[in-house]
Structures are given as C-alpha cells and as structure tokens.
Amino acid sequence: MIDVPKAFPLRAGKSALIVVDMQNDFVRVGAPLEVPDARETIEVHLELLDWFRGRGRPVVFTRFVAGPSPTLMWKWSPAIAPPVCCCWPGFMRAYGDIQGERDCVAVIDELAPRPQEAQIDKYGYNGFHRTRLTDLLVAHDVDTVLITGTVTQICVEDTARGAFHEGFQSAVVADAVSSYAPDLHRASLQTLSMKYGRVVTAHDAIHELEG
C-alpha cells in the first residue's frame, strides 16, 4: 500500500465519491477498450457506494464520451472511430458477460447511478476539464474527493490531477481502480501519492470517514 503521511483527513461531511468511467465499453467482457481488472473492483465499488449513499453524501459518475466527429482523441484511441464507435452515446453493443445489448457509453448495470446522482460527460481524460464537476462539488460544500474507476494511469490519474488543480483534496482508492497494465497502475499510484493526494484502501478510507 502506497501512502504518504496524512496531508489531510478524510471527513464524511466534506467528502464526495467520484467514480471514473466504469462504463460498458471499458468493463464488460469483449468491450473495445476492455479492462478485465475493472470487473474485480465492482464489489469494492458497491461497498463504497453503499457507504456514501447511506449517508447522503454526493456520488458522481464520469463517462468518457466520443464521436461523432473526429478529434485528437481518435489518434490515440482508434477504436473510437467507425466502425467500432467506442463510447458513442446511443450506440448499442452486445458483450460476452451479459444478455442483450447495452448503450456502450452507459455506466455498467451493477453500479447503475441513481436518479439524483450526477453523471458528468467528458470528451477527454480529466473529469474536471471543461465540465461542471467543480461547480457541482462546490455547491455541495465538498473539499475532498475519493476517486475510483478505470483506467488508473489515464482517466483516474488525470482526474486526480484535475482535482488537485481545482483545489480539492483527493484520495485515490487503490483497490477500486484498475488498469490493463500492472506496471503503469503501480507507477501511477506512486506518482499520485507523492505529489497530488493520498492513496488509500476502501477499508481504511471508510474507517477514517467513520472516525
């Protein structure tokens, strides 16, 4: 476990949960940008969601959105382009681990957002870049965010960096983030813990929030 001395405490009344890109086109079996390890974090996500929901604390889901016109992102993720159309809203796709088709950009069924929970659509890696996420958190008097989701070294890390630059304290939940590259996953958590925030386990985070 990577963690530096506690630069800030986790306080229930000031914290929100940000779930990064736990979408069908990343998590489901056979997805175009499949991260198999993301499925291993679902139970931990459910534990964290249950805790935040049970106490009326803000829960925010980010969704990576692409299409229909080419952008710089297409150069780095060719699956975004036709005919695959990865992460295009309304594009229905069948997956190997679930019956029927699903909207490829939607959050997976297991973590389905509740009606009152915000879903922030982003066209890049950072959940704060050109979105309403900062305003949403400020409106709820949040100064600390717990960050989960996928992919650790890309959208999770960039969102944690974004939180730092927007003035929020961030704690990345190590057992609730995932990657297709274990070495990059570890390096990303080490970098974040050095200069951008804390890295904690879900168990330790909940224990501290309750304290």
Image: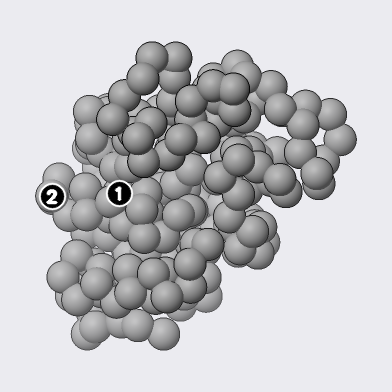
**Is residue 16 shown left or right of residue 8?**
right
Please rate how many residues cluster around mark 1, counting C-alpha atoms within 10 Å: few if below 14, some from 14 to 19, many from 20. many
Question: Amino acid type of disc 2?
Answer: His
Quadrant of the image occupied by residue 144: bottom left
Q: Is residue 14 visible?
A: no
Q: What is the quadrant of the N terminus in the image?
A: bottom left
Pick the residue in front: 125 or 48. Answer: 125
Determine whether the residue tagged by mark 1 lies in a helix, strand or loop.
helix
Residue 73 x/y as whole percent: 34, 33
Residue 81 x/y as whole percent: 48, 25
Badge number at residue 159: 1
Residue 155 x/y as whole percent: 37, 49
**Is residue 138 shown left or right of residue 120?**
left
Colouring convention used in this rendered image of the protein: one colour
Please name the residue shown 22% across and 85% down the image: 5
Please name the residue shown 77% across and 27% down the image: 101
Q: Say which residue label 2 marks.
A: 165
Question: Amino acid type of disc 1?
Answer: Thr
Pick the residue in front: 69 or 13. Answer: 69
